[in-house]
Amino acid sequence: MGRDRFISLMKAGLIYDRSKGFKAEADSNLVIITSILKTALDEDFEFVPKCFVCNSSVECYLCAYCHICDVKSSTPDCLCNKCMDREDTFIMYGRTLMKKIS
Amino acid sequence: MWVERYGPKNIKDMVGNEETRISFLNWLKDWKKGSKPAILIGPPGTGKTTLVHLAADELGYNLIELNASDVRTKDKMTQKLGPTLSTHSLFNGKSLIFLDEVDGMYYRQDRGGIEFVQELIDSGRVPLVMAANIEDDKKVIKLIRKSKVFRFRRVVPRLVELYIEDILKKDVAKLSKESIRLIVREAKGDMRAAINTAQSLAGLSTEELSSVVSSRNLAYSLKESFEAFFNADSQEEAYKALIASKVPPRDKVKIAYLSVINSGLKGDTLIKALEKIGEADKIVNMIGTTQEWRLLRYLDRLLAYSLFNTLPKGSVSYSEEDMPWNLKVRMWNEGKVLKDIGGRLSKFLHISSREAVSIFMPYLLVVIGKEKKSLERFIRLLGLGESALKVMVKESERVFLKVR
Ligand SMILES: Nc1ncnc2c1ncn2[C@@H]1O[C@H](COP(=O)(O)OP(=O)(O)OP(=O)(O)O)[C@@H](O)[C@H]1O
Ligand SMILES: [Mg+2]
């Protein structure tokens, strides 16, 4: 990938963890990151949102909103199909946040 | 309105921007004297203002807030914030200063406002939180450099849906899956827009709903929005009613104008209301020439905070009926003449011209009596002419109608 690109990626807020790979956070500039990676890898790729409740990857292609969802300008966490279908999703979602606060 | 009634009451009840919410709460928890200020940046309706309020509640802070509608001259700010900054108040519990909408229009016309904020930042004696929509404004960039930044993004569709579904569970309203999808799609990650649309769809009959859903004609109509505006109980509610409709600002000013002139408001109240609408109109034009379109969002604030306060509750209702132009011109002229008369009277009575018209004039007219001759003499005494006399005769008729 090259040193310069790597530095630009870090500057745009991408975080590198040896064991887990790259991670984008809330204040990462996803627009810049995308454009750097696209030229570096020379192929299209997508950001995969995580489910806030169970931490699994969200299957965007199964989502009713996949055509209008602008992943790059939205918040990085979403809900997966399984969690979305529960009866108590809203409560679980709030609870997960409380756990992370304390 | 639903945005108030069903807005989040706790940080955990908000949706989206999870990491930002957590880190902001931690920032406030860990705040020490001398800590940098915080600035929350992101698109409308994502919960910036809400988060600051809820976090302050949760941690027992007394919130002192200034937003785009507050005039931010150094004097005014010292007046409002001064007591908090004096050592004395340190004994009266902890305070948090919140400068909302720092990219707002009044902020740029500040006299000394920015310096005051600068002093606040440098003093670091109380937590200072700011919020803004954009970050490419020069002044905002300056503030960002000195602050800890908390970035907000649009809320993802599934979480918008989750929140709307939750509101619908609490309320009597039922909406089809199709309508909910439409709400979520049109909101584009703006929770305020989503909740407002849900409310207006919930008020429709099944037939209306299906025609709206098929034509996708969403958001509050001007009528809904202004009806809620004129009947609001507070400025804040009035503001929320106005921003709920997404029509060009010029149309809002026009409807405000038509509703007011068709309302039968009288004398000083009418003048004041027309003055405020005139100011709003000027600003729309000014923004048109400078092309600073983003400032338009503060027009709603201006109308809500200045016009709303001049109107007695329930005195105006929505009207889009245009008057014949000659009548309009007449009302406009009468307003000007009354102001003139007030101005002259004020010099005699040593009071403001507004008080002269609204408080003293009716009594004066009773004392002067119905005789046109006495009115003529009075007008001459004030050094005014024929047009003033005509208006006075009319005012006099009104007063005697009431006296009887
Ligand atoms: N994250 C959220 N979760 C649930 N409801 C929300 C959220 N954000 C906003 N709302 C709803 O929208 C209303 C307006 O939100 P708020 O005033 O906090 O937005 P904001 O980000 O400050 O917008 P602006 O940039 O226009 O000032 C709230 O009263 C609430 O009802
Ligand atoms: Mg706000």
Image (spheres, helix red, strand yellow):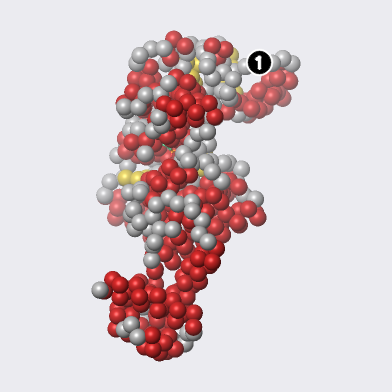
The x and y percentages for residue B147 are 51, 41
State the image quarter where residue B56 is shown. Answer: top left
Total number of numbered discs in the rendering = 1
Q: Which residue is mark 1?
A: A45
Q: Is residue B42 visible?
A: no
Kindly identify which chain the residue marked by label 1 belongs to.
A
Classify mark 1: helix, strand or loop: loop
Q: Position of residue B34 (x, y in %)?
A: 43, 44
Relative placement, left or right, of A28 versus B342 is right
Please name whichever residue, B48 or B4, is drawn nearer the observer in this view of the structure: B4
Task: List x then y, in percent, for residue B135.
Answer: 58, 41
> What residue do we see at 58% from left, 23% from top?
A68
Vertical arrangement, residue B71 with respect to residue B330, above or below: above
- Asked if residue A80 can be seen in this view, the reply is yes
Give me the residue at 52% from left, 54% from top.
Answer: B254
> Observer-nearest residue: B325 or B96?
B325
Q: Amino acid at mark 1?
A: Phe
